[in-house]
Amino acid sequence: MIDKIVLASGNAGKLREFSQIFSEWQVEVLPQFAFDVPEAEETGLSFIENAILKARNAARHSGLPALADDSGLAVDALGGAPGIYSARFAGAGADDAKNNSRLLEALQGVDDSHRGAAFYCALAFVRSAEDPVPVVCTGSWRGRILQAPRGEQGFGYDPLFWVEEHRCSSAELARETKNRISHRARAMEHFAAAWQALAEEH
């Protein structure tokens, strides 16, 4: 029975979120920095490939089963960019403000009807670094890109992501609401079902 897993991330928010979910199954979630896991080289061409690479890397260095997520924004008018490069769209080490500015520049002159976009999340779970059958779950969240940022909540591209059903940007949503309807929430719903099936196998 699995009672400990390593999360292939040092993000405190993600650690808190996943720890809460896994506590229901009496599973302890440990951050990868507890094992001095070096950052994985994200050489994949998709969110799924990079999530698997990160999970295998964390499992290899910790000796524990590992969970990783890879997520980002894909904008229709930009052929799916920034995609897997969402965190560094404005260059290596770019912060959220620079990435948002770069996105607005790239969409200059594009009217609202052609500013469709989606956030994507891929979750990958491996029992070991060589696991031949990783559990992969995905989630997506459709919206469109605003002409200017709105709201103070969230992070990343949230101030530019318009959520039609709530008539506000993702950065104007209450955290509880966002955590219920986001791409990561949808991927986690699929993962919860997959985890139950895994637990039954053991």
Image (tube, grey):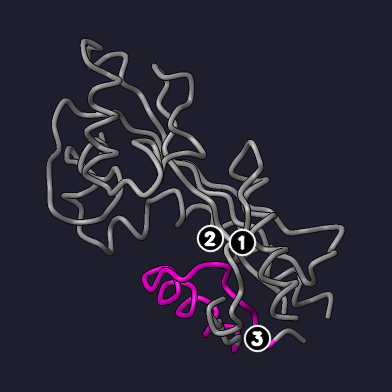
Q: Is residue 109 above or below residue 134?
A: above
Q: Is residue 171 above or below residue 82?
A: below
Q: Nearer the viewer, residue 137 or 159?
A: 159
The answer to which image quadrant residue 28 occupies is bottom right
Q: Position of residue 59 (x, y in %)?
A: 72, 72
Query: How many tags in the picture?
Result: 3
C-alpha separation, residue under disc 2 versus residue under disc 1 = 5 Å
162 relative position to 120: left or right: left
Which disc, if any, is residue 188?
Answer: 2
Q: Nearer the viewer, residue 152 or 162?
A: 152
* Residue displayed at 13% across by 31% down: 148
* Residue displayed at 68% across by 88% down: 3
Circle 1 is placed at which residue position?
191
- N-terminal label among 1 and 3: 3
Few, some or many residues within 10 Å of mark 3 (<14, 14–19, 20+): some
Contact (Cβ within 8 Å) of mark 2 with mark 1 = yes
Circle 3 is placed at which residue position?
4
Which disc, if any, is residue 166?
Answer: none
Q: Is residue 116 above or below residue 48?
A: above
- SS for tag 2? helix
Q: Position of residue 123 (x, y in %)?
A: 60, 56
Q: Position of residue 69 (x, y in %)?
A: 55, 57
Q: Is residue 16 magenta?
A: yes
- N-terminal label among 2 and 3: 3
Q: Which residues are magenta?
A: 3-26
The answer to which image quadrant residue 153 occupies is bottom left
193 relative position to 103: left or right: right
* Residue displayed at 42% across by 72% down: 17
C-alpha separation, residue under disc 2 versus residue under disc 3 = 18 Å
Residue that lies at the very extreme toward the front in this rendered image: 92
The answer to which image quadrant residue 97 occupies is top left
